[in-house]
């Protein structure tokens, strides 16, 4: 399914290097615009800390090493004032594929609606802990 | 507070429903019968689409006599567009930054 946001860019770097830039927390934090502890493992939760003080959590849903990373922004965030508040939940799908002369990165972000809130321990921990 | 754009995009995923929204936007307010006159679908089908749009908060209705008149509520549409603009520009910025990051390492 295609989301309302779609972007496709070809970088002149090998796919392996692009994949590491997308999934290694130190490198991801260097370009994403937020400090993050994301681990590319299904079920892992990650925190993104933005320079304005906003904190957003994400849940890694699917990983195909070297090729595909899918994570979901959870429906809560901590604002710059430190208070938790609702945020529109969405799913981010990142596909990496080698092409002539480089690597294509395709990003699709789709709102998931409230039906996408994970139930059980993860949802509870996020709600109580963020 | 930001509202959830997901329901709006879901509701607008159907092309006929988008036509219903376009008609309502032109007419200001309309009954299902009036909308059905201008689209190749039945009044019942129009009513179903309007109910789905009302669920997503995109339209409101009021009854006058035997008629129900629908109109567009601009809030959720505006929120959905703002979401697209802000999330889209976030990714534009991130991808530019990723390009710079990758170039530094070559």
Image (cartoon, coloured by chain):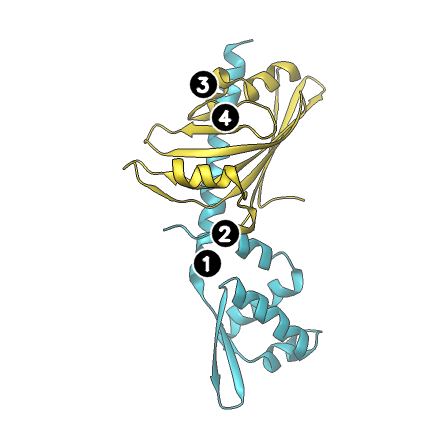
Have a look at marks 2 and 4 and say if they share a chain.
yes
> At numbered mark 1, what does the secondary structure look like: helix, strand or loop?
helix
The picture places residue B53, in percent across and down from the top left corner, at: 55, 66
> At numbered mark 4, what does the secondary structure look like: helix, strand or loop?
helix
Looking at this view, is A28 or A7 the one in front?
A28
Q: Earlier in the sequence, mark 2 or mark 4?
A: 2
Q: For residue A14, say whether it is visible.
A: no
Alpha carbons under labels 4 and 3: distance apart = 12 Å
The picture places residue A16, in percent across and down from the top left corner, at: 64, 15
Chain letter for mark 3, please: A
Alpha carbons under labels 1 and 2: distance apart = 7 Å
Alpha carbons under labels 3 and 1: distance apart = 35 Å
Residue at which label 1 appears? B76
Answer yes or no: do the residues labelled 1 and 2 have beta carbons within 8 Å? yes
Between tags 4 and 3, which lies in front?
3
Looking at this view, is B26 or B77 the one in front?
B77
Name chain A's colour: yellow
Q: Residues within 10 Å of mark 1 (few under 14, many from 20)?
A: many
Residue at which label 4 appears? B96
Q: Which mark is residue A30?
A: 3
In this rendering, the count of numbered labels is 4
């Amino acid at each position: 399914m295609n989301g309302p946001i779609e972007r496709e860019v070809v970088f002149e770097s090998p796919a392996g290097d692009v994949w590491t830039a997308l999934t290694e927390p130190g490198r991801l934090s260097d370009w994403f615009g937020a400090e993050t502890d994301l681990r590319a493992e299904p079920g892992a939760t990650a925190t993104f800390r933005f320079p304005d003080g906003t904190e957003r959590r994400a849940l890694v849903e699917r990983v195909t090493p070297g090729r595909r990373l899918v994570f979901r922004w959870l429906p809560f965030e901590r604002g710059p004032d430190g208070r938790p508040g609702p945020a529109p939940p969405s799913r981010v799908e990142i596909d990496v594929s080698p092409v002539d002369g480089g690597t294509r990165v395709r990003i699709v972000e789709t709102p998931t609606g409230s039906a996408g809130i994970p139930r059980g321990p993860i949802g509870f921990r996020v709600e109580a802990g963020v | 507070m930001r509202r959830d754009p997901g329901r709006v995009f879901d509701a607008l995923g159907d092309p006929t429903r988008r036509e219903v929204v376009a008609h309502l936007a032109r007419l200001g307010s309309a009954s299902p019968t009036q909308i059905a006159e201008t689209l190749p679908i039945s009044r019942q089908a129009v009513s179903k689409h309007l109910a789905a749009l009302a669920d997503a908060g995109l339209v409101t209705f009021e009854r006058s006599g035997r008629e129900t008149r629908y109109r567009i509520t601009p809030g959720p549409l505006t929120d959905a567009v703002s979401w697209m603009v802000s999330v889209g520009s976030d990714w534009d910025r991130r991808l530019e930054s990723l390009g710079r990051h990758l170039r530094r390492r070559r």
